[in-house]
Image (cartoon, helix red, strand yellow):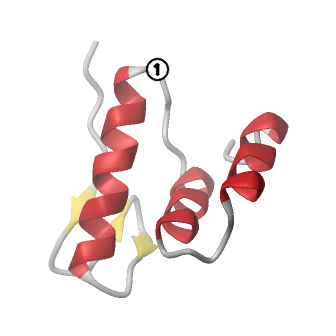
Amino acid sequence: MFNTIEIDRNSLTIMGVKFSDLKTLESTASAIGSNMFEGFKPTPKGIVIIRDYVMGKISLIELVAFAKQKAYV
């Protein structure tokens, strides 16, 4: 089954999560889309975590820790 998420390139948001620029939004959307094929169900919290990783605000170690804690739910 294919699920969609709300991406607004004009407002620079994904599921209501704000992005600073289109490049970061598109990189994050691509990462989310790839993970959705593996069964990931995005939430606004999860989008914030992925966005922050793409922007370099959190490290890969922190990203993995969030995933293990299921902090994206």
Residue drawn 17% across the image and 72% down it: 9
- Quadrant in which the N terminus appears: top left
Residue nearer the viewer, 53 or 69: 53
- Helix, strand, or loop for circle 1? loop
Residue 59 percent coordinates (x, y): 68, 64
Question: Outermost residue, bottom direction?
Answer: 20
Would residue 25 be found to the left or right of residue 15 on screen?
Answer: left
Circle 1 residue: 39
Question: Outermost residue, left direction?
Answer: 10
| Residue 11 image-quadrant placement | bottom left
| Residue 29 image-quadrant placement | bottom left
| Residue 60 image-quadrant placement | bottom right
> How many callouts does the rendering have?
1
Q: Amino acid at mark 1?
A: Gly
Query: Is residue 5 positioned above or below 16 on the image?
Result: above
Query: Is residue 18 positioned above or below 20 on the image?
Result: above
Would residue 35 be found to the left or right of residue 2 on screen?
Answer: right
Would residue 9 be found to the left or right of residue 33 on screen?
Answer: left
Residue drawn 80% across the image and 35% down it: 68
